[in-house]
Image (tube, rainbow, N blue to C red):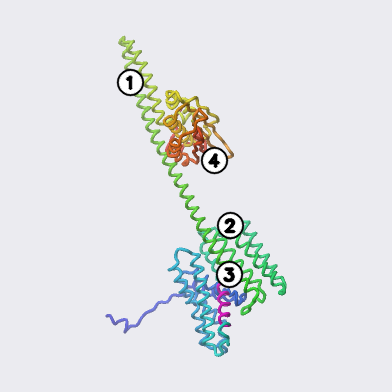
Amino acid sequence: MRLNWWNEGLQLKLRIHPAGLALAVLYAIACWATRQLSLDQFYLPAGVRVAAVLLCPPRLWPYLLLGEYAYFAQMRYPMIEKYGVTWAVLASVSLMPAVMFITHWGRRMIANSVNARLLAIALLSSIVVTLLNVSFSQLLWPMPPADSALAFLSRAVRFSVGDFIAILTVAPLALLWAKRNTEPLWRTISTGPTAVALSTMTLLGVTASLIPTEASTLRTSLQLLMGLPAIALTCLHGWRGAAIGVPALNLIIGLTTPKPYAAAFDASTFTTQQIMAITGVALLLLGSRISHYHRRYQLREVGEKNAINLARSSHLASESDLRERAIHLRKLGDGIDLSLSEVINWLNSHGHSAIASSLTHTANVHSRLFREQASLVYPTALEQLGLYVALQAGGVRSAWIDTHRVTEPRLAGDPCRLSLDLQLTAYRSLIDAVSLLLKSESGQVIVRARCISVGQQRGIVMTASLLDRHRALSGTTANLVRERLAGRALAFGGSVHCRHNRIVMVLVESGTTTRRESPKGIHLAPA
């Protein structure tokens, strides 16, 4: 049974997909078309080769091989008689597998940085492909080029730089297209600064191409000035800007170079292109770092917003629980008052008027104290009458009066225009601030509050300060203020500061939310 495969042979299943054949045809046409616009120092098919391998998953690489071989077949078949069939075959079949191997290695070894992987693949591909090309021509041509070692090296460097520039021209655009669902590419291109930068770059390139060959210095200067819009794009949009600016820069310089056909070489432009290659690498690295730190900033900003939302939800949940407790206490107080009223009526009906009168007085006093303490748990009056009434008529006002240290609050504006959760936060913050001053400082305390409105922003500014302006808050008090009040203020878009003799608290909210819009979990009680 184990030798059945030897007797019966191996069965191979090969499936050819029409989409794969279309990909092979499209790749071959792209290589042929870009070769018509190429130079030795700017060989665009090398960029198309790397971009195709980067874009396509490995399962489609066989179709890329098919397209590569079709492209080389139509180009090198007429060269067989001059250069030999061995060179035509080996020099055609080895380039794409080499790039595929380098790309596979780059994905495995440099998995964390897309930009570093791109530059590594571009550098290695340009060097390896160039070495293969010049080596095969030197070894397999019937009459190899009679070059010296220096000429051979110069030719290899020229081809390698041309391939590298071409890869930096096409591959970033391919990666940008691959990230179109995560990177807002089209919005970036459509913005005004991007359009201005690309237009300026194109204008400089066209102007440089119209300058006579004799004025090569001026033409080189204009070509170098084209790097400024690319730098601006990188600074504006990070890696996306570099992935647009660098290819545009290389493409404009390459297409505006004289003699735009294959195997042509322009020595004056080659120096400029070497500078632009180095500039392109620098811009891609700079753009990658800008995007990295921008992404980290965005993640931190989102984390801060989530933390603030969680803190706000926690505060609202706590207020909801306290409200339920206050309602329960009020029901208990109503039950006690009802029971005492029945006892007082029974005493009056049986002729115990003096005892009934004393009990009535005692019940009224304790009922008032009980309700004041219940209002400290949760200010139900705030829901119907607003923040200022809760501060002036609730249990907190009685507690302040009993200390004989808190003066009459100075309140301005209409707090009813603020949302209920903001009013609750202001209520708790102001009570805590006054409590800290009463415990940690001596002397009289004055409370101020003023509602503010600037455009769509509404809020409230509150101060709890010592009446003596010549006294400053102690360091211990300032630390307690930051520990106990800053968290609640930040959760509701505000801030807390200690300034000389006072605590300043600012709470703001956006939009036009009114007091009647209760936050989730808190329901407005009937008046």
**Disc with the residue nearer the chain's start (2 vs 1):** 2
Which circle marks residue 339 in the picture?
1
x, y percent for residue 167: 55, 71
Task: Say whether residue 159 is magenta.
Answer: yes
Q: Secondary structure at mark 2?
A: helix
Q: Amino acid at mark 1?
A: Ser
Quarter occupied by the N terminus: bottom left
User: Which badge, 4 or 2, is on the more N-terminal residue?
Assistant: 2
Q: How many numbered discs sit on the rendered protein?
A: 4
Q: Amino acid under label 4?
A: Gly
Mark 3 vs mark 2, foreground winner is 3
Q: Earlier in the sequence, mark 4 or mark 3?
A: 3
Query: Seen in the image, is 210 located left or right of residue 418?
Result: right
Query: Distance of mark 3 from mark 2, alpha carbons?
Result: 21 Å
Mark pair 1, 3: CA separation: 92 Å
Residue named by callout 2: 236
Label 4, label 2: how far apart the Cα atoms are: 30 Å
Write down the region rendered in magenta. 151-164
| Mark 4–mark 3 CB contact (< 8 Å) | no
Query: Which SS class for mark 1?
Result: helix
Q: Nearer the N terminus, badge 3 or badge 2? A: 2
Using the image, tell me which numbered label, if any, was put on residue 511. 4
The answer to the question of whether label 4 and label 2 lie on touching residues, with beta carbons closer than 8 A, is: no
Which of the two residues, 342 or 11, is positioned nearer the viewer here?
342
Sequence-wise, the earlier of marks 1 and 3 is 3
Q: Residue furthest left?
A: 1
Can you tell which of label 4 and label 3 is closer to the viewer? Answer: 3
Q: Taking the image as drawn, is residue 33 in sight?
A: no
* Amino acid on which disc 3 is placed: Ala
Q: Is disc 4 placed on a helix, strand or loop?
A: loop
Q: Which residue is mark 3?
A: 277
